[in-house]
């Protein structure tokens, strides 16, 4: 399955998204139900309050994404233990915009779930 990932712009200086990409490729973490996935794009929300996440989800779908995942930095607050205060709104708006034909995952991995290989 092809997926697009949306991440928090505030954590870009802390995280390269390595665990998100690896979990998607290996079908681990939140991607278990989808199986191994090809990531067609990894974009940020565009900055607070995250309004651009909705249009960027659309861009990812146009690029071929059959599922969209909000990265764990947004919904679980990784790696800073600071979940996005707008996460429910962002999630709801994306689901509303894309409808039932596109699966929307609310995270990518747990904090200790799938450590990147060295
Ligand atoms: S809106 Fe949320 S996800 Fe986007 S930069 Fe701000 S805190 Fe991060």
Image: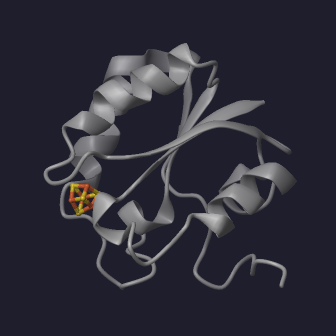
Against 89, residue 76 (above or below) is below
Which residue is depicted at the point 26% across and 64% down? 84
| On-image quarter of the C terminus | bottom right
Which residue is depicted at the point 44% across and 77% down? 78
Q: Is residue 4 left or right of residue 24?
A: left
Q: Is residue 118 or residue 37 the one in the foreground?
A: 118
Most distant residue in the left direction:
49
Which residue is depicted at the point 74% across and 51% down? 24
Indicate the position of residue 60 as horizontal and vertical percent values. 51, 26
Q: Is residue 108 left or right of residue 77?
A: right
Q: Is residue 14 left or right of residue 39?
A: left
Against 102, residue 89 (above or below) is below
Res 67 → quadrant: top right
Q: Quadrant of ligand 1?
A: bottom left
Q: Is residue 90 left or right of residue 17?
A: left
Res 65 → quadrant: top right
Q: Is residue 35 or residue 25 the one in the foreground?
A: 25
Indicate the position of residue 93 as horizontal and vertical percent values. 27, 32
Count of numbered circles in the view: 0
Indicate the position of residue 85 as horizontal and vertical percent values. 19, 64
Q: How is the image coloured?
A: one colour
Against 68, residue 70 (above or below) is below
Indicate the position of residue 114 as horizontal and vertical percent values. 75, 76
Which residue is depicted at the point 78% across and 30% down? 1
Q: Is residue 84 or residue 17 the one in the foreground?
A: 17
């Amino acid at each position: 399955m092809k997926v697009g990932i949306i991440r928090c712009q505030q954590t870009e200086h802390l995280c390269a998204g390595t665990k998100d990409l690896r979990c998607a490729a290996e079908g681990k973490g939140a991607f278990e139900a989808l199986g191994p996935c090809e990531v067609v794009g990894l974009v940020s929300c565009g900055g607070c309050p995250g309004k651009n996440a909705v249009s960027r989800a659309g861009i990812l779908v146009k690029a071929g994404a059959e599922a969209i995942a909000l990265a764990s930095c947004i919904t679980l607050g990784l790696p800073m233990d600071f979940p996005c205060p707008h996460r429910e709104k962002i999630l709801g708006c994306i689901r509303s915009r894309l409808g039932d034909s596109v699966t929307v995952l609310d995270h990518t991995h747990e904090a200790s779930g799938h450590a990147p290989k060295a």
